[in-house]
Each structure stands twice: as C-alpha cells, then as structure tokens.
Image (cartoon, rainbow, N blue to C red):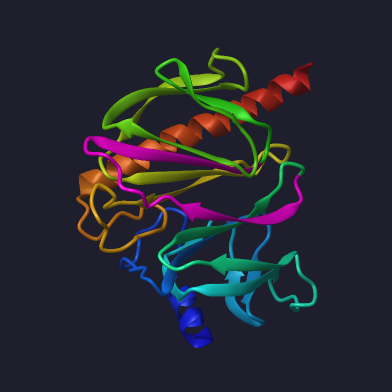
Amino acid sequence: MRNKLAAGIAAGVIAAVGIAGPAQAISDSTADLSVLHAVPGLTVDVWVNGEVLLEDFEPGTLTDALDLPAGDYEVVITAAGDPITSPAIGPATLPLAANTSYTAVAHLAEDGTPTATLFTNDLSTIPAGEGKLTVRHVAAAPAVDILANGAAAFTNLSNPDEVKANLPVGTIEAAVAATGTTDPVIGPAPVTIQEGVNTIVYAWGSLEDDNLDLAVQTISGLHSTPDGVPSGNAGLAADASPAQVAWSFAGALGVLGLLAFALIRMRAAKLTK
C-alpha cells in the first residue's frame, strides 16, 4: 500500500495552474485525497506512515487526486532534507473514510504559525441549472464577508473555515467587504457559475508578509452520479470542454482575487492609521 501511495503522489503532483490527471474513482473501500502546500517560503518533505512520499514539495502546489485504501494515515511535514524527528507540522493523523473525497492543506494559522487542515470535499448532487462555489480561508489574515449582487453571501469567513453555496448558473456580481459591512473594499466584479461543478478556491499565504496567493480546485460531474473525482487546479473531468475549463478557472480567480486585494487594502488602511 505504501509503494502504491508513494508512486501515486509522485506522479500526481502538478503546478498551481496545471492540468488535472485522470479521474480517481472512490468506492466502498477507498477514499480520494489531494494535498495542497500553502505555507509560503518553505519547501518541504511530506512523510506518510514513516516514509518520505513527497520530496521538495513547493508552496502553491496541489497534488492530483489519489485513490487510497480507507484508514488512518500518520503525516509529518518537515523542511526539505530534515529528518522526521524535526517536524515543521505534525505528526497528525488523517482519518480517511471510504466513499469520501478530501483535501489536506498545510497552511498558516491566522497568527502565522504552520498548521494543517483536512477538508472534506462536498460531492453531493447539485440541482439542475446550478453550480457550487466553495471558499476556504487558509491564510494568515483576518475575516471577511463575500458579497453576491450586493448582499452578503458568505459572512465572517475566518481561518481555517470554509463556506459554500449552490448558485444558479450564470454570472453574479461579486465583491469583498470587511466583516459586518456591505461597503465593498474591492469590486464588484463578474463571476461565472457553471452547472454541476464544485469550484473550490483557497486563500493562502500571509497578509503581514504581503504574499497572499490563491489556489483553485474543481470537482465536476455533480449534476449526476460522478464516475470519478478529478482534482487539481483547473482540474475538470477529462471530457470537459475548453470553454468549461476557462469559465471555471476565471470564476475562481475572480472570487479569490477580490479576497486577496481586499485583505491587502485592509492591511494598508491599518498601517496608515
């Protein structure tokens, strides 16, 4: 099992804006796992069950989805080249349940200390004519509200929480405001929602260090029973059209771009006081 995991991860690592690998099929005995490295400025090794399975894993990288036997996995993250006895994060146990899709994220807590969060990806069926938008805050930064068509759609989003909603297919006017307000700090800007797709966007990095960035993961085929769960930035199913890829990626960039710029504006305002 360890050899399969090592080979799968090594083959599945892709760049922050890359092309997803083949879809992985979860089952009654397997789980689906992607890994996102969201700790700025630190190249790491990832150890699973005592073995190095990811070497020189760079910030902003998201692995392709892996189909793994359900069970518990002990994970330790070290600076590249360091022994397992000198962890930067962990050890932590990742309990992977069958028939479930996960993304494990190494990131900064709100106070800037390295940590890790295991997210469960929503694979529930999306009603016809709708898509899902999921936003995950894994940055060392304060909370914000995300507005849709002038109203608060997601409120008080803080690290390491997520918010999600099904939205009608089409274009919404999205903006970002300080928590508890409706006066946009940035935006509004158009964001496209596409049918049967869960677009997951991550805000990561550090507001204090001015290195906020974003990562994008998409899961498609949710308008009906999916044959598999593709993952990775811009990672649509193998039969997705180029137009679908472009729409999904542009929509995610719009939301996280607004979030990043809003946080930068908030920090600048704080410094001028």
Q: Horizontal and vertical percent for residue 33?
A: 47, 65
Residue 248 sits in quarter: top left
Would residue 270 appear left or right of 11 to someone viewing this image? right
Residue at 20% across, 58% down: 239
Q: Is residue 131 visible?
A: yes
Q: Along the line of sight, which residue is nearer the eye, 97 or 40?
A: 97
Q: Is residue 100 magenta?
A: no
Q: Is residue 128 magenta?
A: yes
Q: Horizontal and vertical percent for residue 175?
A: 47, 22
For the stretch drawn in magenta, what is the main secondary structure?
strand
Up-down relation of residue 205 to residue 53 (above or below): above
Count of marks, rendered view: 0
Residue 168 sits in quarter: top left
Q: Quadrant of the C terminus?
A: top right
Q: Horizontal and vertical percent for residue 49?
A: 63, 80
Would residue 82 appear left or right of 176 to someone viewing this image? right
Residue at 38% across, 71% down: 28
Q: Which residues fall within the magenta stretch? A: 112-139
